[in-house]
Image (cartoon, grey):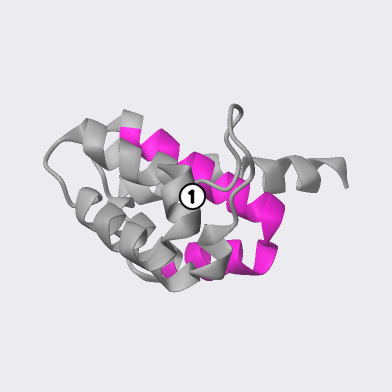
Amino acid sequence: MRPLIVAYPEKSLKTIEQWSKSDNIYVRRLSSECIRINLPWAKKMVTAVEHFEEYKTILNNLKNDFNPYVRRSVANNLNDLYKYNKELFWNIVREWQQDNPTEYTNWIIKYGSRTYLKELAKK
């Protein structure tokens, strides 16, 4: 999927946005994994930054997911984003924190902030 996202970002991200609303947890997880900046087995993909509003919409659709399998992927997405672009990371986190976050969203924020928290602990 990643080569398609790079080649056809607008069309691909529209499809992935629909996947993020699926009833199927595996499809929702796929929607998050497809847009991650860093995957251990794949080349870095910065479509998330280049098409930030679409990326943010997909994560917004998943921020309250009841399934821990999906939530972990969203949190990993945030952690990747922090490593690549701290300003965009904080854009999402602050927006979610101001939006009366659920326990699920709070978990995603906490786990997705682990690199930031490690940096704070070193200071």
Where residue 66 sits in the image (x, y, percent)? 23, 38
In the rendered image, the residue lying farthest to the right is: 123
| Residue wearing tag 1 | 109
- Could you say whether the residue bearing mark 1 is in a helix, strand or loop? helix
Q: Give the quadrant of the N terminus.
A: top left
Where residue 56 sits in the image (x, y, percent)? 42, 64
Does residue 72 sit above or below 58 in this rendering?
A: above
Is residue 15 rendered to the left or right of residue 94? left
Does residue 95 sit above or below 79 in this rendering?
A: below
Q: Amino acid at mark 1?
A: Ile
In the rendered image, the residue lying farthest to the front is: 7
Seen at 79% across and 41% down, the residue is: 121
Mark count: 1
**Residue 80 shown in magenta:** yes
Does residue 51 sit above or below 13 in this rendering?
A: below
* Range shown magenta: 70-95
Seen at 49% across and 69% down, the residue is: 52
Where residue 45 sits in the image (x, y, percent)? 59, 50
